[in-house]
Image: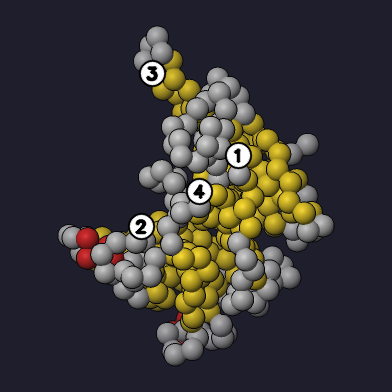
Amino acid sequence: DVTGWWPSIGIDPSGNAMVAYRDVHFGFAADDFARSDVELAEGSGGSYQVLTIDVSRGGGEYNRVAFSPAGLPAVLQWNTNNSGNPSPGVYINRQTKPGSFSAQAAAGVWVAQAISAGQMGGLAGQGELGFAISPKGLYAAAYYDAQNNLLMYTDSMDGAKWSPATSLDTIGYTGLYPSLAFDDNGDPAVAYYRCNTIGPMSTACDATTDGLYLARRVAGMWSRSVVTANPMLTDGMYPALAFVKGKAVIAYQQSSFDAVAKTSTVSWWVAEAP
């Protein structure tokens, strides 16, 4: 079988690891992708149990795992748009009742809900999802809306009723690879890559105008700041955001091209807020 795509790992309050991933089954044809499952493996040590949480709808891309204050898991994922899947979009699959892992397959324990319909992504592999749940139980999601060519944010106090999506950046071709986290005050923040400042219809990234950006909501208002934008480098791809002792910390990729030697150099960096 073709399985294990787009893995995302989370550690529940009891210290158990949960891994969400895509099971494509045989992987021989488009129909296999359109009917792929989202699966969740739970375990500790060397023993894992596997539960199918979204069945045969083409889901499982860009998986992200988070836990409610009660310790119940939730997975945000993308159901792709291809033959056999009439309902593409960003979906949340969440456990609504406590119980043992073996009992989670019972009716009513898991629910699936689309929080955004239509296309997402951007260039191939540049979709990704930002997802987190605050200690107070606020569910938050960020994604690149490929229909409107905007970086979007939405949240929910119960995981069921979601706010109207808000655009976080409208400058250029932007909002790729979003990574979402809550700061120590419980406010959301999103790190993302801006490809260029020309516009959403120009998908050629420009090192002179690209960069890593951070959007933060404070007192209900969003603001943006540049983290790094070196005009000599392609910087800010694949960010991973976290808050450590109140400071934003972002891991990201940086690359450069030597036109004379015709070689590329790629490295990982960490940026920390002052």
Furthest-left residue in this view:
28
Marked residue nearer the N-terminal end (4 or 3): 4
Left of 82 or right of it: where is 274?
right
Label 3, on which residue? 263
Marked residue nearer the N-terminal end (3 or 2): 2
Q: Residue sitting at 43 percent across and 15 percent down? A: 258
- Confirm or deny contact between disc 1 and disc 2 (CB under 8 A): no
Colouring used for the render: secondary structure
On residue 224, the disc is: none
Label 2, on which residue? 5
Left of 89 or right of it: where is 224?
right
Q: Position of residue 77 (x, y in %)?
A: 46, 63
Label 4, on which residue? 149
Q: Secondary structure at mark 1?
A: loop
- Between 190 and 101, the one nearer to me in the picture: 190
Label 1, on which residue? 171
